[in-house]
Amino acid sequence: MSTLPIFILSFLFSVACCFERLIFAETYFRHGDRTPVQPLRTGRFNASFYGNQLGELTPLGTRQGYLLGKKMKKRYVTNLALLDENFLNLKEIYVRSTDVNRTLMTANAFTAGMFDYGKRGRDFPDSPDWIPNWTPIPVHTAAMSTDYEGNPFPLCPRATELDQMQLQSQSFRNLVRDHEDFVASLERFCGEKITVRDSLTVYGLLDALMILKKHNLTLPEWATPAVVERLNTISDGQLMLKFGQTGEFGNNIIRLRGGSKAKTILSRLQDKWNCFLAKNETRACLWYGRLKFHAFATHDMTLWGMLTPFGIVEKVFGKHHEIDHAASVTFELWNADGKPMLNVVFLKNPGLNEEFQSVTHLIEGCPQDRKFCPLLTVVAATQKFFPGDLAEECKPKNPKVTKRSLDGRRREVAFFDGLVW
């Protein structure tokens, strides 16, 4: 008997049993470089240095958004052919942004970089004065007060109650004990009160210093590497409490913050898969059936909270949760032999030397030697953090704590007007 038919059958079987096709991707990325929201009050790098354009996207930030779009185009249009570079189909893409100047501007720069393959006269005007190869792409948004997916700290009275209760935890008491005298000693240099008990003061100071460092500007003499490192440690401790990674009430906080985001992400993947299988004509599937690429311009804190239920925050972002401008996390849905498989990829920044890295294996229960993980395995690992009725779970339970919490919330809103994240 000839071995040729056996070889052919073997080859065909290997192809049939290893079919892998990307059918959907949803990516979340931080806005590009920005000016500080709360600049230093002393020295020359104060508000006037930035022209009072605080919290706004810089030219560098615009370029970062554009380069990220180029990176995404290379992966999802050129290499993986999720989108057809011969036909720009607006029904296949959906771009969202939080309702903040710098994210909206980053989203527009991103779309200019990714979707530059439109056709003159079909997708954009056939006119000599038109911007070359630029196709306007819709960028959708929602008010921050109702944006539970993009806003890292949406209004949730129960969550702000739990924030106050976390301040009584041993983790927070240790933070105060170890660092309160240190931050108080910085007040004479900064010209404002700084305390471990108020995360906004520490974050604002650290943020202003880190922006100077990123732009190769000279830091004040008192801002030594040791001082910056310690501020990083303090801010990490404060935010880990706020996102529920530490403290007595952590799991409940994760449900109300990152949990609702993870639920939205994974539910969208499941809906896409169900529509892909059924090919039905329900209202939802008319949208999901055609949708292939979902992008969201958001904030570093959104990415942090979003990954908390997956248990991979430090593994992805590192010790100090340093989330670069225009960093992205993408959830890819693959059809692998007729089964829904997830690949989570991280891009540290859109610089030329950075490449997409699969971080799927870091999720509990996922194979260590493959980039794919069954979608249902990931759902099973995270669903304990999914809220049921979020509106119901966000209702306050302790009137006294609620009043203190809401007072603090009002101050947060005032501080983050324009949003630090």
Image (cartoon, rainbow, N blue to C red):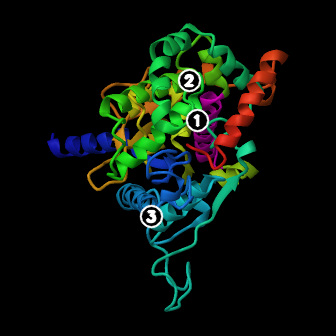
Q: Label 2 near label 1: C-beta < 8 Å?
A: yes
| Residue hosting label 2 | 382
Rendered residue at 32%/40% (across/down)? 13
Q: Is 256 rendered above or below residue 343?
A: above
Q: Which residue is mark 1?
A: 266
Q: Residue furthest top?
A: 170
Magenta includes 400? no
The percent position of residue 178, horizontal first and vertical second, equals 45, 13
Residue labelled with disc 3: 59
Mark 3 belongs to which amino acid? Pro
Mark 2 element type = helix
Please tell me whether residue 260 belongs to the stretch shown in magenta: yes
Residue range of the region highlighted in magenta in the rendering: 257-279
Separation of marks 1 and 2 at Cα, in angstroms: 9 Å
| Figure quadrant of the N terminus | top left
In the foreground, 209 or 71? 209
**Residue type pointed to by label 2:** Thr
Q: What x and y, as percent, mark residue 395?
A: 81, 24
- Look at the numbered disc 3 and give the secondary structure of its residue: helix
Q: Nearer the viewer, residue 347 or 363?
A: 347
**Residue, far front:** 188
